[in-house]
Image: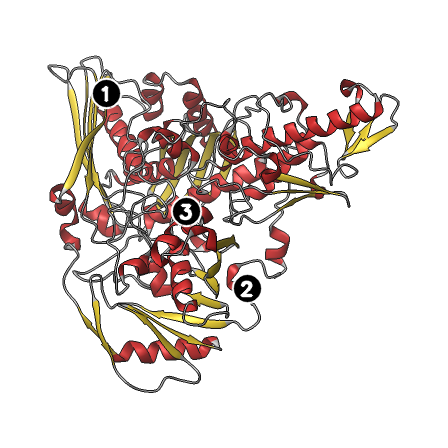
Amino acid sequence: MNLAYHMATGGGGDDRPRLPGSLHLNRRLGQWLRFHAEGRVTIRPGKVELGQGILTALAQIAAEELDVALARVAVAPAATPDSPNEAVTSGSLSVQECGMALRHACAAARAIHLSVAAQRTGVPIEAIRVEDGAFLGPRGEAVGSYWAQADEALLDCEAPPDARPKPAAARRVAGTSAPRLDLPDKVFGAARFVHDLRLPGMLHARVVRPPSRGARLLAVGEGALPGDARLVRDGSFLAVLAAEEHVAEAAAARLAARATWEERDTLPEEAALADWLRTAPAEEGVVAERGEAPPALAHRVRAAFLRPYLAHASLAPSCAVARWEGEALEVWTHSQGIYNLRTDLSKTLRLPPERITVRHREGAGCYGHNGADDVALDAALAARAAPGRPVRLLWSRADELAWAPLSPATLVEVEAGLDAAGSLASWRMEIAGNGHSSRPGRAQEPTLLAASHLAEPFAVPPAINPPLAAGGGAQRNAVPLYRVPHLRIGLRRITEMPLRTSALRGLGALVNVWAIESVMDGLAALAGADPLEFRLRHLDDPRAAEVLRRACAMAGWAGRARAEGTGMGLGLARYKGSGAWCAVVAEIAAEAAVRATRLWIAADVGEAINPDGVANQIEGGAIHATSIALKEAVRFDRRRVTTESWESYPILRFSEVPAVEVHLVPRPEEPPLGAGEAALGPTIAAIAAAIHDALGVRPRALPFTPEAIAAA
């Protein structure tokens, strides 16, 4: 769990003075940073690089607080047990949790080193300044350096609560755009990804998947396999090992043809998905409730919004490398949470966690809980059959699209109304769907895919929703930003899980923001008001109002004139109700299919450590949301997911990417907020509103294909 989830679920029973972010649960300074005599400093965050540029921002924070050049800061990849346990890199929380922990830790380390230099030289600590790691006295004389004191174990202590990071006005590195530290290796082809990892004696493995959900392996026919390939089987887990990758590929294909499976129907009817979401067994609860329903409403809007199952659809399939040495296991993975993965590997393999080392290496861009954890268990199971040999296991595209955790299908039903004065008076909303988290390390049983296929299988626990205080899952962003006297938000967490579901970028915010903003547009029309004016009239949050005004000013909303077949719409949300504010205006062209042509985005993320990185994340999230809005849906029959390729699961092409303009509201004095997920809900909502502006139709089902628009 991330720190916020940990605290929200009672995991914070620690009466020591509160330390910022993840530092509170990982208090030893030496875990976070180390100085080297040759003039470098290594920071060791527990958060990982997933393509979001977080390691660059963390290095900037360290360089700022230590007063060293950014080029001197190296970032060590996360690994158990050396790195702080920061749980999962998710929820747009890395700067809030890890960044603020590192800022405090570096400020503490700076103070400790200056104190030692002052004691040795007699120069008052307040008279010492730091220039690129060198300690200088009042006349510019050298009185020490981090590097001269590097080997003295000064950081082998707990972080003091009274460390004082620099005030906002004194920062020169944090708050300034810096080039991504990870990009040169990627651009010039250095072996940075786990897919590129090659170790001496490495074998290659492939998994033969069941033909459908619920299938059980009955038998594997006799016969030779290509080359040196050999079979690995544990119950219904079936794999092959070979010295060469192409041999493993051929062997897996041959083995699949020989396997006999028992199959059954386990999935609902796709065409009746909304009905299944209404009626499937569920736990029911109330997310938020206040006020009494008014006796009469002058105008009312009722609407239902359906989002399908969504795939993560990373460009490269998941990959892992594993090696058994005696009773110890070492795994290289692109997991978002190395400690959480270690927990579930320990449960599945019945191996003490201290015998498992998990090392992070980057993979393809990660947008939530994809197959990275599952493939790590696959690799470990295959490697167990070849002790002492590293085994690299790569998923196929079909594995990635059909067997990785999916973002759950969700039905949101809203009824809202206006009083006689045209003001928002009542809001009722019901959300139905599976939970949004099956991440490892959070349940009694392991949640990894192959754990349920073993000869002694583990049950697949239903996905959970984190509590609203930790951002929520299906209920994320379900409470409108707008002032409304009567409010009730209900939640049906479906406890049957025909398709394994977990977190995808934005979680429930994707459908909830779209539903809220679409209904607000409908109410504005009933009130005879402009959508912008109607929203501003119901906003008490000045930072929300500011991003809304700025996005509309960027787009020329006030004097807009549109050509036939084009439309413009807007969307607004504060991510999770506690994160970044984001407003989006979308322009679309209604051609043979809807095409998003331009997006104008204003965001308030508090302090932006690396403004260019923040803009990249917001832009990337908006483009991802555009793909979801216009293209993406997992299709299935009664037994299997049928979208197993790019042809059947299309995503936005480069030629279809809209022009994106991003404006960040400068707030250097405010706490930083995450950026990677804030734009998704508002972008989908803005595209839906733009479709109505162009065509007079409000789409009620994702994706907004010609067929869905016609049905609306």
Determine the residue located farthest toward the bottom in the rendered image.
Answer: 224
Occupied quadrant, residue 289: top left
* Amino acid type at image mark 3: Asn
How much space separates mark 3 and mark 2, taking CA atoms? 22 Å
Image quadrant occupied by the C terminus: top left
- Left-right relation of 241 to 76: left
Q: Taking the image as drawn, is residue 240 in sight?
A: yes
Q: Are marks 1 and 2 in contact (CB under 8 Å)?
A: no
Earlier-in-chain disc, 3 versus 2: 2
- Left-right relation of 687 to 114: left
* Residue at 28%, 53% in the rendered image: 633
Across and down, in percent, residue 553 comes to 46, 27
How many residues crowd around disc 1 within 10 Å: few (fewer than 14), some, or many (20 or more)? many
Question: Compared with residue 621, is residue 266 higher up or lower down, i.e. above or below?
Answer: below
Q: Are marks 3 and 2 in contact (CB under 8 Å)?
A: no
Determine which of the numbered discs, if any, sits on residue 197 in the image: 2
Query: Dot 3 lies on which element?
Result: helix
* Residue at 76%, 43% in the rendered image: 39
Across and down, in percent, residue 527 comes to 23, 20
Question: Compared with residue 123, is residue 677 higher up or lower down, i.e. above or below?
Answer: below
User: Which label sits in the foreground, 1 or 3?
Assistant: 3
Q: How is the image coloured?
A: secondary structure
Question: Compared with residue 576, is residue 168 higher up or lower down, i.e. above or below?
Answer: above
Determine which of the numbered discs, if any, sits on residue 340 in the image: 3
Query: Dot 1 lies on which element?
Result: loop
How much space separates mark 1 and mark 3, taking CA atoms? 50 Å
Across and down, in percent, residue 296 comes to 11, 16
Across and down, in percent, residue 389 comes to 50, 70
Earlier-in-chain disc, 1 versus 2: 2
Q: Please name the residue that numbered disc 1 is placed on.
A: 527
Occupied quadrant, residue 464: top left
Determine which of the numbered discs, if any, sits on residue 207 in the image: none
